[in-house]
Image (cartoon, rainbow, N blue to C red):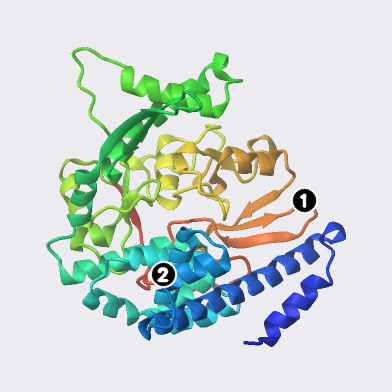
Amino acid sequence: MRDEGVATALDALLGADPDIASRAEIGAMIRHAGQIRGWVDAANVRFTRRLRQLEAEGNSESPGIALTDEGRRSGKEAKATEDRERICTEIPALEDALAVGAVSSDHLDALARLTRNLNDIERSDLHAVADDLVASATTDYVCEFERKTRNLIDHIRATHAPHDDATELERQKAAANVKRWVDKITGMHKTLIELDPIRDATLHTAIDAQLARLRQRADQAETPFAQLQVEALLTAVSTEQPGEQRIPEITVVLDGRSLCNGRHAGTICETSDGSPLPVSTVQRMCCDATIIGATIGAHGEALAVGREHRTATRAQRRALRAMHRTCAHPHCTVGFDHCRIHHIVWWTNNGTTDIDNLLPLCERHHHLVHEGRWQLAMTPDRVCTWTRPDGTIWHQGPGNNRTKRARPRDPPRPFGEPADRRQPTLC
């Protein structure tokens, strides 16, 4: 099982001293460690495959038990290793990529979760695009890879059952529940709410509206964000307006082709934070919805207002929401509605409130740019460059995370998308 690349990486780590290393040297160590970790994970896949064969011959206990006993692992981790072996047996190229550190075990875990309930026909269709799966896994962060793979699987299922697109949403609605209990140790009262994506979006739209109001109040300036969230939740569920029925509003982002013709391989159909929705359900919702093209302002509202306004307008926020699920930082998962709208060229430096100068940033990464001395630049086609305080370019890639997001230094590669650029629609 000797691998010269892994041996070289191990020798480099054994001879390294992280305590005195530069940033570039630490980066090299992390890459070496990732290569070694991938090789070990691939080795465990091979161990599991052989244990499965020995079990069938009556010469071993199950792989899960052997991995738990010999490897001193939890049952959960042993089960994850068995799932990785299944995925690698079905798509051998993923095992090869794992062995050299080009793909992480997290990518395999995401694929295992998404394919667990596929039938034989659906699984065969997925294997037919194995090259695209491997290409995506080697270039995309895990969350982006998982989203694209889920969309591809939804497309495959819709192909075989075109009239049953909303089955998953109905299943989620039926499984929704509320649980309440008291922690016997801390005495804290806990509530667990499980909701389908549409009702969850409705609830959090109301909470986010209350949160925005609280954050604008001067007496809440020093209140921790977690406490503001609690107060926003309590206010949202307890506010009563006699004689006035409140109509819940949610934002759904849907590409025009799916709205007109149904699901396709490059479909975008999700809540503003990226939770997927059945196209057929959203098409029905659109009968009573306001539909706004993302490339123009609502009702002709301008997306470039110069220095007339310092804060982003409602039309600009809608357009940005269609382009960004989350904070524009490549690693960040904070939802759009919890972000500030940042001026690339700062307002104080004579920057304008134009869509081409605006990006959503969470509190942490907004602070990183303003007080942390990081530089953030963006081209007219929304390619962002993040530069460390020492002047080193850390990341350069698309700032729009509803399209393909490449890893730093990796060339973009399409995955399951049509050649023409998709234009999202807000509903």
Could one spot residue 404 in this view of the protein?
Answer: no
Label of residue 389 in the image: 1
- Amino acid type at mark 2: Asp
- Residue 424 versus residue 313 in the image, above or below: below
What residue sits 22% from the left and 12% below the top? 242
Which element type, helix, strand or loop, lies under badge 1?
A: loop
Say which of 413 and 111 sits in front. Answer: 111
Farthest residue to the right: give it: 20
Foreground disc of the pair 1, 2: 2
Left or right relative to 205: residue 361? right
- Amino acid type at mark 1: Pro
Q: Quadrant of the N terminus?
A: bottom right
Left or right relative to 193: residue 339? right
- Residue 222 versus residue 44 in the image, above or below: above
Q: In the rendering, at what x and y percent does residue 287 appear?
A: 15, 45
Location of mark 2 (residue): 83
Could one spot residue 163 in this view of the protein?
Answer: yes
Q: In the rendering, at what x and y percent does residue 422 appear?
A: 36, 62
Of mark 1 and mark 2, the one earlier in the sequence is: 2
Q: Label 1 neighbourhood size at 10 Å, few (<14), some (14-19), many (20+)?
A: few
Which element type, helix, strand or loop, lies under badge 2?
A: helix
Q: CA distance from mark 1 to mark 2?
A: 42 Å
- Quarter of the image for residue 101 reads bottom right
- Quarter of the image for residue 310 reads top right
What residue sits 66% from the left and 87% below the top? 2
- Quarter of the image for residue 154 reads bottom left
